Amino acid sequence: MLCVLGSAVAFAVAPIFGKVAYAHGVDSFALLALRFASASLVVWVLVLVLAVGGDVGRPAGRTVLRVLALGALVLPAEVTLYFASLHRIGAGLAEVLLFLYPMWVVLITAVVLRQQVTRLVVGCSVVAVAGAALTVGAVSGVDGVGVLLAVGASIGFACYVVLSGRLVHGVGSILTTALITTGAAVTFSLAALVTGSQGPTDAAGWAATLGLSLVGTVVSFLLLTLGLARMPSTDASVVSTVEPAVAVLLGVLLLGEPIGLLQVVGVALVLGSVAVLVRVEAAEDVVDAGAGH
């Protein structure tokens, strides 16, 4: 859970780097291509270091291809759908719809994978989604196509969470992250070449891109993968809803942005649902440990 919480914080910081990069003339596809390409290089260095010590396994070729496809197809599809929705609806509504994904994770796990989901997880996910919606605040600019695009992005991210949670056990956390970022780098690099996207042209643009790569990609995706290797996707999706709450708090602390009563309630609901889940899971671990002795 600490890994997933750390991942959510890193994801919440990522938009700050993105805004700075955009302000310095960096285009979306070029930013995404550089983000994932440089991140993949960093993670591959970690893989090589671990390989020297014999800590990296050798997964089957089919499994490696599946993880690469996850990064090259599912993740870029989710990102593209989300950014496309921003051209049609407000950022607040897009964020609310994106954070429906814990509900999709629960549904995919229960209906498609036919795995048991506890009432606690269902209840916590409902409260967390409601809290995330309140945290984002008022929405505006409703457009049917934009709503569908944002909902599609939330479904895409739910699929990513579920699939990566299943694949990581056969590959390993760090190698999984390396393969996913590599797949995403290839897809976004091709998109940048086709669209002629402009990359950074000054030091501030490069610094923001590097920050997005290291914090918003290497740290965020690596911690998320480490968390998914150790806890169910349903639980991880609930914990990760702290992201908008962290984003709001960072805006208040670092940028002096105002915060309303509904946002305070939303933050409380998100943190409360996560706290309940953490407390119950910890109690169950103690019981299991006692039974083991």
Image (spheres, grey):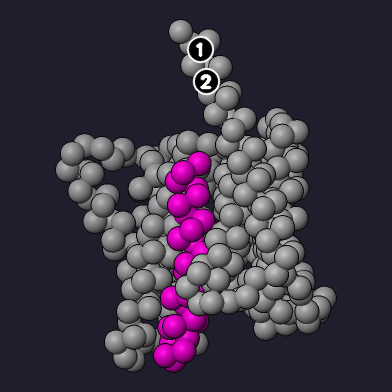
The residue most toward the top is 293
In this view of the protein, which residue sits in the foreground, 204 or 87? 204
Label 2 is placed on what type of residue? Answer: Val
Q: Tag 2's secondary structure?
A: helix
Q: CA distance from mark 2 to mark 1?
A: 6 Å
Magenta span dominant secondary structure = helix
Query: What is the magenta range?
Result: 1-28
Residue 247 in view, yes or no: no
141 displayed left or right of 232 = right
Q: Could you say where residue 155 lies in the image, as x and y percent from the top left?
A: 68, 57
Q: Quadrant of residue 212?
A: bottom left
Residue 122's disc is: none
Write the residue at 49% across / 81% down: 19
Dot 1 alpha-carbon crowd within 10 angstroms: few under 14, some 14 to 19, many 20 or more:
few
Q: Secondary structure at mark 1?
A: helix
Q: Which residue is mark 2?
A: 286
In this view, the residue in front, 65 or 11, is 11
- Determine whether, in the image, residue 289 is placed left or right of residue 199: right
> Where does the image place residue 176, in percent across and percent down from the top left?
41, 49
Residue 280 at x, y percent in the picture: 62, 30
Q: Which residue is at a point 47% across and 69% down the rendered structure image? A: 14
Instruction: Identify the image quadrant of residue 24.
Output: bottom left
Q: Which mark is residue 290?
A: 1
Given the image, on which type of amino acid does mark 1 rest?
Gly
Residue at 18 percent across and 39 percent down: it is 53
Q: Nearer the viewer, residue 198 or 212?
A: 212
- Residue 22 in sight from this viewpoint: yes
The image quadrant of residue 96 is bottom right
Badges 2 and 1: C-beta atoms under 8 Å apart? yes
Q: Is residue 23 magenta?
A: yes
Tell me where residue 4 appears, x and y as whole percent. 50, 48
- Judge whether residue 26 is colored magenta: yes
